[in-house]
Image (cartoon, rainbow, N blue to C red):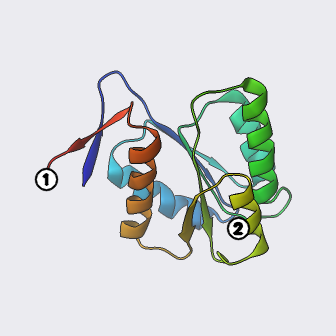
């Protein structure tokens, strides 16, 4: 399934992972989709929180186990920030984690995160999950092209 942006629309995404090589690989996968105008990276939850204060994102993809501010703390901070802004538009969060059965994932689900990608993943798996999330939450910005 191929997606394209509707006219006059832009998509932005935030990648949060402490491993630069993983961020680089994910960026490459996202660039393959040819949808995102802005791909912003953060190395941990504190950097991600700062970036969310200055920019709105259509999707956030975050690791959970990171130094400094962990993924779950970032998700809590982001959700609190969103509720203070009283935003109607949902910013879906995708967890990218090697430990999808752990306590961190359970906490994330408690905070409303419903999208999980298991590390390591293939480009196909990653793009499929991002596409699924876009189709569910960002239909106002994209359209599906028939193959």
Q: Residues within 10 Å of mark 1 (few under 14, many from 20)?
A: few
Element at label 1 = loop
Tag 1 and tag 2, C-beta contact below 8 Å: no
Q: Where's residue 91, x and y in %?
A: 59, 40
Q: Does 78 sit left or right of 133 as displayed?
A: right
Task: Tell me which corner region of the image, top left, top right, bottom left or bottom right, holds residue 125.
Answer: bottom left
Q: Considering depth in this image, is 112 or 126 the residue closer to the camera?
A: 112
Which mark is drawn over residue 75? none
In the figure, 39 relative to 120: above or below? above
Other residues around mark 2 within 10 Å, as few (<14) / some (14–19) / many (≥20): many
As drawn, the residue found furthest toward the top would be 8
Residue 54 coordinates in the image, percent (x, y):
70, 28
Q: Percent from the top left, x then y, of residue 127?
A: 39, 60
- Name the residue beneath numbered marker 1: 147
Q: Is residue 61 above or below residue 117?
A: above
For the N terminus, the image quarter is bottom left
Residue at image x 53%, y 77%? 120
Q: Is residue 123 left or right of residue 106?
A: left
Which x, y percent locates residue 81? 77, 34
Query: What residue do we see at 69% from left, 60% from top?
Result: 109
18 with respect to 91 (left or right): right
Q: Residue at x 65, y 27 (%)?
A: 87
- Disc nearer the start of the sequence (1/2): 2
For numbered disc 2, what is the local secondary structure?
A: helix
User: In front of the other: label 1 or label 2?
Assistant: 2
> Quick one: which residue is furthest to the left in this view?
147
How far apart in space, not on screen, are marks 1 and 2 (Cα)? 35 Å
Front-most of residues 10 and 146: 146
- Count of numbered badges drawn on the protein: 2
Res 101 → quadrant = bottom right
Q: Is residue 65 visible?
A: no
> Which residue matches tag 2?
105
């Amino acid at each position: 399934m191929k997606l394209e942006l509707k006219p006059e629309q832009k998509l932005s995404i935030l990648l949060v992972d402490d491993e630069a090589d993983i961020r680089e690989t994910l960026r490459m996968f996202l660039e393959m989709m040819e949808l995102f105008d802005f791909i912003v990276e953060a190395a941990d939850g504190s950097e991600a929180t700062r970036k969310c204060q200055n920019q709105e994102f259509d999707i956030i993809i975050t690791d959970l186990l990171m130094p400094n501010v962990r993924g779950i703390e970032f998700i809590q901070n982001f959700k609190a920030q969103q509720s203070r802004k009283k935003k109607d538009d949902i910013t879906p969060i995708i967890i990218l984690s090697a430990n999808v059965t752990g306590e961190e994932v359970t906490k994330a689900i408690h905070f409303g995160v419903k999208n999980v990608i298991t590390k390591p993943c293939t480009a196909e798996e990653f793009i499929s999950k991002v596409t699924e999330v876009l189709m569910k939450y960002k239909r106002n910005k994209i359209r599906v092209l028939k193959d």
